[in-house]
Amino acid sequence: MPPGQEVGRTLTLFGVPTQALFGQLLIGLINGAFYALLSLGLSVIFGLLNIINFAHGAQYMMGAFVAYFCLQWAGLGYWWALLIAPVVVALTGIVLERTMLKRLYHLDHLYGLLLTFGVALVIQGVFRHRYGSSGLPYGIPDQLTGGHHLGFMFMPNYRGWVIVFSLTVCLATWYVIERTRLGAYLRAATENPALVQAFGINVPRMITLTYGFGVGLAALAGVLAAPIYQVNPLMGADLIIVVFAVVVIGGLGSIMGSIVTGFALGVVEGFTKVFYPEASNTVIFVIMALVLLVRPAGLFGRTT
Amino acid sequence: MVIARALTLTLIALLTAGPAFAQVSDGIVKIGVLNDQSSLYADLAGQGSVVAARMAVEDFGADKKGLKVEIIFADHQNKPDVGSQIARQWYDADKVDMIVDVPNSGVALAVNQITRDKGKAFVVSSAASSDLTGKACSPNTVHWTYDTWALANGTGNAVVKTGGDTWFFITADYAFGHALERDVEAVVLKNGGKVLGKVRHPLNTQDFSSFLLQAQGSKAKVIGLANAGGDTTNAIKQGAEFGVVRGGQNFAGLLVFITDVHALGLDKAQGLTFTSTFYWDADDRTRAFAKRFAERNRGIHPTMIHAGVYAGTLHYLKAVEALKSDDGTKVIARMKEMGTDDPLFGKGTIRADGRKIHPAYLVEVKKPAESKHPWDYYKIRATIPAEQAFRPIDQGGCPLVKK
């Protein structure tokens, strides 16, 4: 029962005023920004390492927690956290890659998936045991409090920042991987590691750093999320399943695919919340099923 | 794409799976704490309820009285099918005599029926639906702490009488949310208010911005949150971001626990007014309980649910002692005959429909400056006397009453 029936003369679409729809479109893009940032990290890791990183949700959560710790223990605010958290969490990712993941590269994908899933459960369990399930408070940085009236909705400044920042990070990542020499090395190393190694490039180190970078993206999304949601040990557990669906819809390993799909599905989910809110947490899986029926490799995936 | 297929299957498996760690044991009087141990209701009930039940056994002095009592617990993951399966296994195979707590009205209504079929005992603390003492009332169930009618009556009345006469509901889409919305809507309409709209969100929603936007579009003076735990805190936190209060609207948190206030921080929670049947800082006896409880529960102070688990378990054990039997139907009947008396709720009674009667408090969350020590969060604005706090016995439609 959407609002606005009493508005009367304003233009409506399926009984919903178009003004309200603009608001929902924007909200969808904001949520899509999180999906895009997270699925981007997954795509980078899968595309270049062939690892299905199920620890991504836990690493996102760790990013938010590091932001909280920065504030509680060191008095360092949001902007520092935006810098520190990705680095710290990426380091834990690098340790994980060096000690465990690298042993699995020659095995079936499922081994990597099971290992990272197990690691995620352990990390989440430890945080939940220590910090409970109702979450810890984290405020919006002073510079970004408040908001603007856009005519059709009240736009909080922080949400605007999220959308601009994550879009920038997404596009920069795409550019580096698809358009620069470094990216070319990375892509070449996944195609034929032996050959690239022969050219004098340290492939194992490159792979380690790539995993660290993907994990860092998850942590970055975690810091962005901290002021909006509670800093909660389970914040990633709920999200990761949706994000994987986004990745599957976009096509595994496709960088641009995950960015576009992330934003698009955020919008679809946003509209579902207006027209049939009860289905808002299932709609993405319905789309996933439909896409897989028609295009098993995903919308942007290459069939190999 | 083999990988995509494997991933899809894994996703499906994950959507239906979750952690489970049922503890199984054997004993004479066996009490099972069945609740959410891992998700959004785990702090307001969870392990705290297990601690509260254990404290009740200790304070009852079971050892000295030669009564062997065991407490076990399990995680129902907020799924009625999982909860039902655990309840059946407990009653049939594990010789559990009484189940206590059970947040999530969907699960509680299922356990309510199973308990009745098996002739066991069920003491509800967390679940809120007033149907448990209404059309679904049972001779094997006592509903202890609070219910949706009491929340509607306390908070709804107070809000409408202070000018909040147009409402928009943001409701959790399951038995509890529906019952709470229904009971509050009745109070609003009775007092001459209007409901301008409602939206139902899935349990455990992270992002409320879409629903908040709809609520803002409705121009209702009051946004009623018919949800609980993490859903409530997320809605309030994001409501601050979207300028709900600055836009002239107010939240009515219809079910708020002290753990939610703690999670939000006083800065965001200040001024919230809601109904609670227990506050740890009310008198010396509740403070003494809270101190012992917090030491054993990671510093988390008791919610009204924890208090209800403690008091309900204590009263159950007294009835078992008096009856010298743990036959579920007989013990519940005895619990209703005996007056209740415990350090947390004082003296009270249990009605024929299973409703435990005690006063309720209308509380307001303090401003950060007013809070003098940790967990010093509430001001008690009004006390609703026991006889007015709950739905009159003849209005619930409980078949047990007509007999």
Image (cartoon, coloured by chain):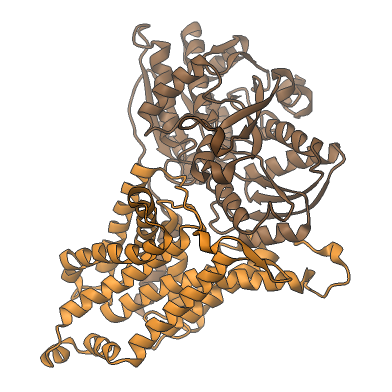
Nearest the eye: B236 or B368: B368
Q: Quadrant of the N terminus of chain B?
A: bottom left
Q: Is residue A80 left or right of residue B241?
A: left
Q: Measured along the vertical axis of the image, is residue B240 above or below residue B253?
A: below
Q: Quadrant of the C terminus of chain B?
A: top right
The x and y percentages for residue B182 are 74, 42
Q: Measured along the vertical axis of the image, is residue A117 above or below residue B132?
A: below
**Is residue A55 visible to us here?**
no
Note the chain letter of the brown one. Answer: B
Residue at left offset 16%, top offset 69%: A103
Nearest the eye: A5 or A164: A164
Q: Measured along the vertical axis of the image, is residue B135 above or below residue A73?
A: above
Q: Measured along the vertical axis of the image, is residue A262 above or below residue A227?
A: below
Q: Is residue B234 left or right of residue A176?
A: right
Note the chain letter of the orange one. Answer: A
Q: Is residue A252 left or right of residue B354?
A: left
Q: Quadrant of residue B48?
A: top left
Q: Quadrant of residue B55?
A: top left
The x and y percentages for residue B395 are 78, 27
